[in-house]
Image: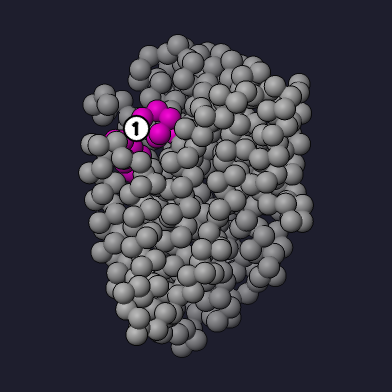
Amino acid sequence: MLALSIFIVTLVLVIWQPKNLGIGWSALGGAAVALMTGVVQLPDVVIVWDIVWDATFTFVALIIISLILDEAGFFTWAALHIARWGNGRGHLLFPLIVLLGSVIAAFFANDGAALLLTPIVIAILHRLKFTASATLAFIIATGFIADTASLALVISNLVNIVSANFFDISFSRYALVMVPVHLVSVAASLGVLWLVFYRQVPTRYELDELDSPASAIVDHQVFRAAAPIFIMLLIAYFVSGRWHLPFSLVTGIAAIALLVIAGRFGQPHQPRVVQLGSVLRSAPWQIVLFSLGMYLVVYGLGQAGLTHYGASALDWLGEQGVIVATVGTGFLAAVTASIMNNMPSTLVGALAIDQTQVSELTRQLMIYANVIGNDIGPKLTPIGSLATLLWLHVLAGKGYRITWGQYMKIGLLITPPVLLVTLVSLALWLPMLPVS
C-alpha cells in the first residue's frame, strides 16, 4: 500500500504539473520518498538506470534532431508538399496528412510527430480556411497516428527502446517483426479515422492560399544535410547491432553532426539561421529525470507484488493459445498504460513477462504485444502518455481546447479496433519468422 500510495501521488504530480515543478522533478521526488521509506534500495537505482539510460538519451537526441529540422523548415516544407499533392481535394488531403504523420512518427518518434506536425497542420488548414470542425478532425487524426504509427522501428517510441534494451532485441530483428505489423496498424488507423471523421472533411479547398514549399526552407544547409545524415543514421542502426553499441551513441553522433551544421561551426563567416540555444533549451531534458524517477517508483511497486500478479495473469493467458495470449497481453498493457501512463506500464509489463513460465514463441509474442499495447493503448485516456498530455497543452495554446471527456469519447471509439487488428496481425506474422 505504501508503494502504491507513492506511485499515485507521483503520477498525480506528473499529470498536474504544479508551477515551477516539471515532470522530471515530480517523478524524482517520488523516487526520493520511495528510497527514504525503503520501498526501493540504493542498488535498485543502478538497476533502473541501466534499464532507462540508453532509451532516455536516444529520445533526447532524436528530439534535438527533430527540433533542428523543424527550425530549418523541413516539416513545414513536407506538409506544404502534401497539401499540394491533395490537389484541392479534401478527401485526398486527409489520408495524405495521416500518412505524413505516420512517416514522421516512425522516423522521428511519436512525440516529434505530435508536437511538431500539429502546429504546422493547424497553420496550413487556417490558410486554407477550413472550418473549426474540419480542422479538429485533422488535428485528432494527427495526434492519434503519432502513437499508432510508432511501432515500426526501435527509435519510433521510447517504449520500443526500453523494451528492446530490456529483452536484448537488435534493431534489425525488431524491424523484421514490427514493420509489417506497423503497416497494418497504419492502415487500420486510417480506416477507423476516416469512418469517424469523413463527414467533417471538406470535399474541396483552394490551392491559391498555399505558400510554395520552397518558401518554408529557412536553412538550406541543414535542409540539404537532412537526408544524407538520416540515411547514414538508419544504416548505422542496422550495422551497429553487431557490436551492441547503444542506440544513444549512434543517435547522439547524428544529433551532434546536425548541430555542427546548423551552428556553422568551422564557417565563421556564414550566418547562423537556426538558434541552437533555443533548440537545446527546448530539448526534453526533464525526461531524463522523469525516466529515472518514475521507473524507480514503479520498480518499487513491482517488487511490492504488482509484477507477481502481472506474471500470473500472463501465465494464464499463455495457456489459452497464441491468439489469446497476444491479444490478452496487448489489451492488458493498454488498460494499464491508460491508467498509470505507458512509461511505467512498459516496465511493469517487461518485468512480468520476464517472470512468466511460457513457451519461447508465446514469450516473444508477449514482448511485442506489450510494446503494441503501450504504444497504441495510451490513446484510451489523456494520461496514457506524456506525448498526449503535451499535445493537449499545445492545442490549448493554439485555442483548441479538448476536454478529457471529449478525448475519452473519441479514444474509446478509435483505439480498441486498431489495437485488436494490430495484435492479431502480430499473432499471425511472428510465428512465420525464424526464431531469433
Quarter containing the C terminus: top left
In this rendering, position of residue 435 left or right of residue 144: left
Highlighted magenta segment, given as a residue range: 163-180
**Residue type at tag 1:** Ile
Residue 219: horizontal and vertical position, in percent? 38, 78
In the rendered picture of this protein, how many numbered marks are placed on residues? 1
Q: Taking the image as drawn, is residue 98 in sight?
A: no
In this rendering, position of residue 264 left or right of residue 59: left
Residue lying farthest to the bottom in this orientation: 208
Out of 254 and 393, give the one closest to the viewer.
254
Query: Which residue does the image show at 44% across and 25% down from the upper left?
Result: 366
Q: Taking the image as drawn, is residue 265 in sight?
A: yes
Residue 111: horizontal and vertical position, in percent? 52, 54
In the image, is residue 364 above or below residue 148? above
Question: Is residue 178 covered in magenta?
Answer: yes
Which secondary structure class fits the magenta region best? helix
Query: Which residue does the image show at 35% across and 41% down from the upper left?
Result: 246
SS state under label 1:
loop
In this rendering, position of residue 253 left or right of residue 313: left
In this rendering, position of residue 88 left or right of residue 123: left
Query: Which residue does the image show at 70% across and 22% down from the upper left?
Result: 38
Question: Is residue 390 covered in magenta?
Answer: no
Residue 380: horizontal and vertical position, in percent? 62, 43
Quarter containing the N terminus: top right
Query: Which residue does the image show at 52% across and 76% down from the upper left?
Result: 124
Out of 286 and 126, give the one closest to the viewer.
286
Residue highlighted by disc 1:
169
In the image, is residue 62 above or below residue 27? below
Residue 307: horizontal and vertical position, in percent? 58, 20
Out of 270 and 165, give the one closest to the viewer.
270
In the image, is residue 380 above or below residue 87? above
- Decide: few, some or many residues near mark 1? Use Cα within 10 Å; few <14, some 14-19, many ≥20: some
